[in-house]
Amino acid sequence: MTATPSLVLRGGESVLRFAGGPVTLHRPDKEHHIPLAAISFVHAEGRSLAIVLTASGANEPTIYRVTDVDEAAALAFGEAVTAALPAEPAPDGAELVTTRAPRAPEPPAARGVAWGPVAAAVAAVLLIALAVFAARG
């Protein structure tokens, strides 16, 4: 089994990510998780990439579009996602997409102690202790 490399496509304020599983679209106001079975096809054209979802005959397909992207990166991203699409997609892809508010960055206190300043302080105390012992002895 071949591992799929993690791909990132940035355009404007949007970021698409694909690592073999669902495609994730991050936008400033929303984060969409798009399962591969929800995707009908991916279309890269110039500096834009469109992810077109499957839809029943009565519904218009949902399209997620990212613009102002690198052309070569859009082609590579589209080809990678297309190669991973299942043979039998879901009949209505929009039902499979989950959308939520984007994750807020963790506050510095939640990430733990910044060890750089702590290590510098410990090193300084050890150097002073060594200097004191060297002067005594």
Image: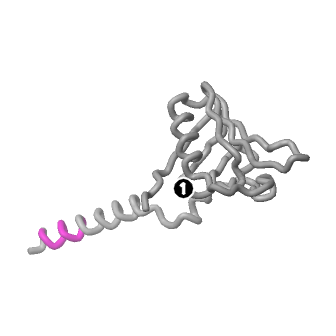
- Determine crowd level at label 1: few under 14, some 14-19, many 20+ residues with C-alpha closer than 10 A: some
Query: Mark 1 sits on what residue?
Result: 20
Is residue 130 a member of the stretch shown in magenta? yes
Q: Residue at x 61, y 44 (%)?
A: 16
Q: Residue at x 71, y 44 (%)?
A: 28
Q: Report how many numbered discs are placed on residues in the image.
A: 1
Q: Is residue 79 above or below residue 70?
A: below
Depth check, front residue: 110 or 65: 65
Quadrant placement of the N terminus: bottom left
- Percent coordinates x, y for residue 106 in the rendering: 61, 59
- Percent coordinates x, y for residue 70 in the rendering: 54, 29
SS type, badge 1: loop
- Percent coordinates x, y for residue 10 in the rendering: 58, 38
Left or right, 100 with reference to 129: right
Residue 91 seen in the figure:
yes
Q: Is residue 96 above or below residue 78?
A: below
Depth check, front residue: 3 or 115: 3
View extreme (left): residue: 137
Depth check, front residue: 133 or 73: 73
Q: Residue at x 39, y 59 (%)?
A: 116
Residue 100 seen in the figure:
no
Q: Residue at x 56, y 34 (%)?
A: 74
Quadrant placement of the C terminus: bottom left
Is residue 61 a member of the stretch shown in magenta? no
Name the image colouring.
Answer: one colour
View extreme (right): residue: 58
As shown in the figure, which amino acid type bears the numbered disc 1?
Gly
Depth check, front residue: 49 or 100: 49
Q: Which residues are magenta?
A: 128-134
- SS assignment for the magenta stretch, majority: helix
- Percent coordinates x, y for residue 33 in the rendering: 69, 55
Quarter where residue 67 is shown: top right
